[in-house]
Image (cartoon, helix red, strand yellow):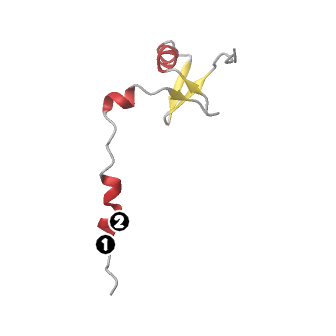
Amino acid sequence: MKSAISTRQKTSGLASQPAETPAQLTERDFTTLDGRLVPRAQGEIALRQHTALLVGGLLIGEWPEQSSH
């Protein structure tokens, strides 16, 4: 006889994953439209200086090219 697994039992693994704290969420780097990561401090400066916008969680602005040394 097969045992029935309820939907609650199937998804219970998702609920057991630790949630991110507000501190963890605020410490993340910003992501641009093209997928580039901008360091949190640099993004916050650009936002304060009005040289960037935060739209739907994406940072929009002009960023210097990253050098690969």
Residue under label 2: 10
- Residue 21 in percent (x, y) is at 31, 34
Whether pointer 1 and pointer 2 mark residues with C-beta atoms closer than 8 Å, the reply is yes
The structure residue drawn at horizontal position 32% and vertical position 42%, both measured from the top left corner, is 19
> What's the amino acid at mark 2?
Lys
Q: Secondary structure at mark 2?
A: helix
The structure residue drawn at horizontal position 50% and vertical position 28%, both measured from the top left corner, is 54
Please state if 51 lies on the left or on the right of 40 as rendered.
right
Is residue 14 depicted above or below 25 in this figure?
Answer: below
- Residue 30 in percent (x, y) is at 51, 27
For residue 25, the mark is none
For residue 6, the mark is 1
Is residue 49 depicted above or below 24 in this figure?
Answer: above
- Residue 38 in percent (x, y) is at 55, 23
Q: Secondary structure at mark 1?
A: loop
The structure residue drawn at horizontal position 32% and vertical position 27%, both measured from the top left corner, is 23
Q: Label 2 crowding class (10 Å Cα cut-off): few <14, some 14-19, many 20+?
A: few
Toward the viewer: 48 or 66?
66
| Quadrant of the rendering where the C terminus is positioned | top right
Is residue 12 depicted above or below 29 in this figure?
Answer: below
